[in-house]
Amino acid sequence: MPGTCVIGLQWGDEAKGKIVDLLTAGRRYVVRYQGGANAGHTVKVGNEVYKLSLLPSGVLTPGVTCLITGGVVLNPAKALEEVDELAGRGIQLDGDSLKISDRVHVILPWHFAEDKVLDSSTGGENIGTTQRGIGPCYRDKVARSHAIRLGDMYRPDFAERIKHITEAKNRVLAAMVTDGDFEPLDADAIYKQYSDYAERLKPYVDDTTEILLSSLEKGEHVIFEGAQGSLLDVDHGTYPYVTSSNSSGVGISNGSGVPGKYLDRVLGVVKAYSTRVGGGPFPTELDNETGQYLRDRGNEYGTVTRRPRRCGWLDAVAIRYTARLGGVDGLCVMLMDVLSGLDEIKICTAYEIDGKRTTVYPSHVDDLRRVTPVYESVPGWKEEIDQVKSYDELPAAAHAYLDRIAELIGCPVDVVSVGPGREQTIVINESLTRC
Ligand code: IMP
C-alpha cells in the first residue's frame, strides 16, 4: 500500500489531521499537496494541542519527513511561524524532516489586498474567504505573468520581478479599492522582507516531485493529506463557494506530481454531522437550537479564523457524491461523541427539487439552493461515548447510525472517532495501521 490518501468529504474541518496522525507511524513521507494557510488542523497528543495550518500533521511524528508539494500556495511568514512555534515546544524541523517544493507559489502582500476586495464584489452573497490571499495567488499562478514560485526567490532577477509586479499590482489595486484606504505597496520593502524569508526557508527547499517518485518506485509508504473538503473543490464543489484548489481526491496527482497508480487506498473523512464556514448553500443547515447544540459540543469555531461554523445534519447525498468522486475505499466518521444526548438524529437521504426526488448532487449552486432535503430519522443515544474504546462498546443506536451511513454512501466505516485525543479513536479496519 505505498500511497494512502486522506481527504475530507464535506466542506472541510472534518478532523483529517487526526487520521493522518493515526496513520503516520511507519510511513516515510506525509505530503501536503494543495491549499495554503487557509486550512487549519488541530491534533491532540497527550495533553498537548497543536494547531497547524500549513505544515502537515505528520510533523508531530518523529522519523517522518513532511513534504509541501507544488500544488500548495505558501505564505512564507506563516510557514516560518509554525516552524518556530514547534521549535519552542521541542519539535525541531530541519531539512530532513521538512521539505518544501521549489514549485510552490508564494503568497505576496498584494494577494491579501486583492482577496479582501474580491470577496466582497461577487455581486451576490460573499464567498466568505479566509482572507489569506489564497484565491488571488492561485489566480496569478494560472495567469502566469505576475506569479512567483519559491524557486524564483533564489534567482538573480528576483528584485527586478518584485519591482515589476509591484508596479503592476499598485495600478490594479488603486482601481479596485474603492473605500479610499489604498496604500501603494513598497517594492523595496517587499523584496527585503521576502529575501529574508527565502534565506530562512533555504534549508527546506527541494524538488519534492523527484523525491516522491523515487520513494514510491522503491515501494516506500506515503500519506497524502488533503486540506479543506471535497465540496470546496474548485472544479467539483459548490462553485463559486469553494476554495481555489482541487481539494477533492482529484487534486492529489496534480498537486503532488504522483500518478494515480501509486494511490492505492483513499480514506474519506466525514463528521458525524455537517459543518460549513463561509458563504454558499447548505441544504441540511440547522439554524436552530439543535445547530447550536452541535456547535457547542463540537466546538465548531474555525481553527484559522475563529468564525462560528454553520452546523447541520449529515448529508448523505453530498457525501455519496464526494466519496465516488474521490474513489473512497473506507470512511472515517469523526466527532461521533458530539451527537450524544439527542433524541433523534436525521440523515439527508435525497433531495427534492421541482417536485422530483433525486440522489444526484446538483452541479449548479442555484439548484442546490432550491433543494429540500428528504430526511430519515434514526434514534439517538443518551450516554456519553468519549471513553468508549471498542466498536462493540458503542450503543446500539450508534451502530445503527454508522451502518446506515455506510449503506447510503456505499463504503465501509473503517474508523470512528469519539474525541480529540489519539486514544479516543476506534479503528475498525485494523489493516489501516499496518504498513
Ligand atoms: P479561501 O480558501 O480562503 O479562498 O476561502 C474560500 C472558501 O473556502 C470559504 O468559504 C472558506 O471559509 C472555505 N475554506 C477555506 N479553507 C477552509 C478550511 O480549511 N476549512 C473550512 N473551510 C475552508
Image: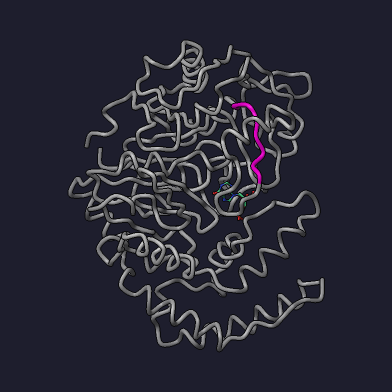
Which range is magenta?
A: 308-314
398 or 158: nearer the viewer: 398
Is 397 left or right of 392, judged from the image as shown? right
> Given the current orientation, which residue lies at the most extreme front position?
47
Image position, residue 5 (x, y; %) = 37, 41
> Given the current orientation, which residue lies at the most extreme left position?
218
In this rendering, the count of numbered labels is: 0
Image position, residue 36 (x, y; %) = 50, 58
274 or 354: nearer the viewer: 274
Rendered image quadrant of residue 309: top right
Image position, residue 354 (x, y; %) = 78, 23
Which color mode does the image show? one colour
Q: Residue 276 colored magenta?
A: no
Q: Residue at x 37, y 73 (%)?
A: 201
Q: Residue at x 45, y 67 (%)?
A: 81
Q: Residue 310 colored magenta?
A: yes
36 or 25: nearer the viewer: 25
Relative vertical location of residue 282 with respect to residue 341 in this rendering, above or below: below
Image position, residue 297 (x, y; %) = 58, 33
Quarter of the figure that contains the C terminus? top left
Q: Residue at x 55, y 22 (%)?
A: 340
Quarter of the figure that contains the N terminus? top left
Rendered image quadrant of residue 391: top left
Relative vertical location of residue 195 with respect to residue 254 in this rendering, above or below: below
Rendered image quadrant of residue 308: top right
